[in-house]
Image: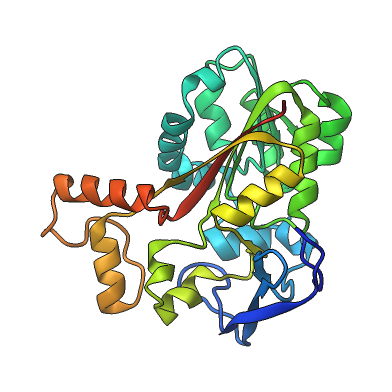
Amino acid sequence: MTDCDLCNTNEYDVIYDGRIRDGVVGKETEMDHKVVKCQGCGLVRLLENPLSMEYYQSDEYRKAYNETAEVSDYIEMHDSEQMPRLNKIGVHAFRDKIALDYGCGGGAFLDLVSGVANKTIGIEPFSGYHESLTSRGHEVFSDSDSAVASYTGQVDTITSFGVLEHVENPSQYLKDAFSLLKKGGKMYLETDNLDDLLMKLEINDFDRFFYRTAHLWYFDAQTLSKIVEQAGFSGIEISFRHNFDISNAMMWLRDKKPTGNGKLNLFDSRVNAAWINFVETAGLGDLVCVEMTKS
């Protein structure tokens, strides 16, 4: 990876050089990796891609990052993440619509909207999930080329959760999504936020946790806006979601490791609601989100 996917510049600054996450929390690379920032547009990326696409589509990858490749385990692990996504987007975006989840994994989000959508489609490179996805009523494609061949200009709503940072070519990924949408169709996308509050606190241990072998690209509001606009989208609306309470941040500052939510009983729901509202409105949430339209 020598050229920036957004502006094709090959001049960059190294912003991190060290070990990064390589699988489940606590597993790191044996060698250092450079994270670089494009001097032309500011897009951040791993300097070199440590994983092959064949590995990314394998059982081994799922076992490394999820400790399992079973679809039932995937659904159990990710079911709780789906309702906040639907609440943010709104049921209206799926009712009586053709809905496609681009990088759907085991299909937890598709299951949630299948009761209101007219048709649910998934694009998922890992074939190990396909049989289950089909049996649950979803049409599934292994890649975007196959989906585009069947559904060019027909999809009402596309979702993408935690996928853009993985793909080799984010620009092409978004252009394929644009091709799939009908005129007036919308895409809703979430990706890790480079401006995460804990990144702003400059905790080196958090850098080692945040950067990982499976994530080739790292977006903030500015670079995400640029790349979706470059793909042809308009009506671009950026927002943020935050999944962690104030105790998670406090524990990071104290212990320099992830602990999840609810580890300190000093803070009640009032404090956490105010905390999350502040973090999201300040643009410091762990996820940066974009709603965009094919006009």
Q: Is residue 137 above or below residue 167?
A: above
Can residue 228 be seen at all in this image of the molecule?
yes
Residue placed at 63% from the left, 14% from the top? 118
Farthest-out residue, right? 149
Q: In which quarter of the view is residue 182 placed? A: top right
Q: Where is residue 29 in the image (x, y as percent from the top left)?
A: 59, 81
Viewer-side residue, 31 vs 154: 154
Farthest-out residue, left? 266
Residue placed at 68% from the left, 24% from the top? 185
Q: In this view, does 44 lie above or below 222?
A: below
- Quadrant holding the N terminus: bottom right
- Quadrant holding the C terminus: top right
Viewer-side residue, 131 vs 38: 38
Q: Where is residue 174 in the image (x, y as percent from the top left)?
A: 74, 43
Residue placed at 50% from the left, 41% from the top? 75
Q: In which quarter of the view is residue 135 placed? A: top right
Q: Is residue 290 left or right of residue 252?
A: right
Can residue 157 be seen at all in this image of the molecule?
no
Q: Position of residue 206 (x, y in %)?
A: 43, 74
Q: Is residue 109 above or below residue 15?
A: above
Image label count:
0
Q: In this view, does 218 lie to the left or right of 82?
A: right
Q: In this view, does 170 lie to the left or right of 236?
A: right
Q: Is residue 67 above or below residue 19?
A: above
Residue placed at 48% from the left, 51% from the top? 287
Q: Where is residue 30 in the image (x, y as percent from the top left)?
A: 60, 86
Which color scheme is applied? Answer: rainbow
